[in-house]
Image (cartoon, rainbow, N blue to C red):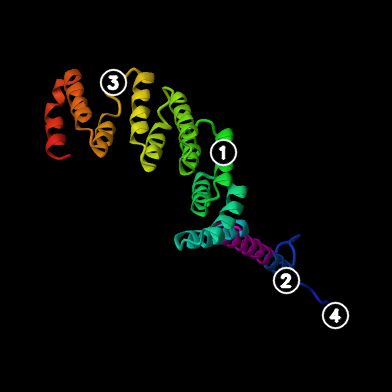
Amino acid sequence: QQVEHNTFNVGVLGSSPSWVTNQHKDRNIAFRFFRMERKAKILILCLLLAGVPSLPAVAQQSQEQTAAYYYDKGEYEQAAQLYESLYKNYSNKFYYQRLYGSYLKLGDYKEALRLAEKRLKANPKELSLYVDEGNVYLLQDKEKKAVKCFDNAIEAVTSNLAPIPDLAMAFVNIGRHDYAVKTYVAARQKTKNQQLYFSELVGVYQAMGDYQAMTNEYFNLLDKQPGTMASVQLLVLNP
């Protein structure tokens, strides 16, 4: 009697049964899909995180907006409290200026002076801070102490011109155009360039109503650079 045997469709001798091969293929496909899906999720997560500010950054932005609101509304006590916190944590120039301004508006000259002195000690090349110190004294009618601070600023001028625009503008902002002139003149002396800051000086002289000094600037420029006649004529006709 012929015995029937259960056999597998093995195909080529020595190869795995078809159902085993298919199972392996299914597993490989599933594994590759899982890896691709996992990478895609990681990529999406990274992209999302890249576009979302960190919690400290969000808190800073919120606090800054609130401080600006109080400052613009003239509620300087609340603004000062917020800018104190912001400046303590980040100490950038904008927060310093807002905090300094809040102290002045509140008449807290002691804190304003302490703030300016401390920042100047940490940033000695930020020459406009001398003006902030002197301005505190001016507001208290202490002219001699104010002038001492202003003179210190001029003495600190070097051939490095980076602080010059801010220093001169700081003097202009408090109505001390005479020291703005001294700032530009000191920069000329340090760099040995007598044409430096020509237009700025002309503008300051004009604001002071010192037309003689303004005219002298024009003549000095023409003497050194005769080819600038056309430019000077335009400046005279359109001050």
Q: Quadrant of residue 48?
A: bottom right
Tell me the mark number nearer the camera, choosing from 1 and 4.
1
Q: Which residues are magenta?
A: 28-54
Q: In the displayed structure, does residue 227 sit left or right of residue 111?
A: left
User: Can residue 95 be spotted in the picture?
Assistant: yes
Residue type of the residue flagged with mark 2:
Trp
- Which residue is the site of mark 2? 19
- Which residue is the site of mark 3? 194
Helix, strand or loop: magenta stretch: helix
Where is residue 4? Give x, y as percent.
Answer: 83, 79
Q: In the displayed structure, does residue 9 sit left or right of residue 146?
A: right
- Which residue is the site of mark 1? 119
Of the residues under marks 1 and 2, which one precedes in the sequence? 2
Where is residue 60? Give x, y as percent.
Answer: 57, 57
Tell me the mark number nearer the camera, choosing from 3 and 2.
3
From the viewer's perspective, is residue 76 above or below residue 18?
A: above
Q: Residue at x 71, y 62 (%)?
A: 12
Q: Which mark is residue 2?
A: 4
Where is residue 25? Give x, y as percent.
Answer: 68, 65
Q: Residues within 10 Å of mark 2 (few under 14, many from 20)?
A: few
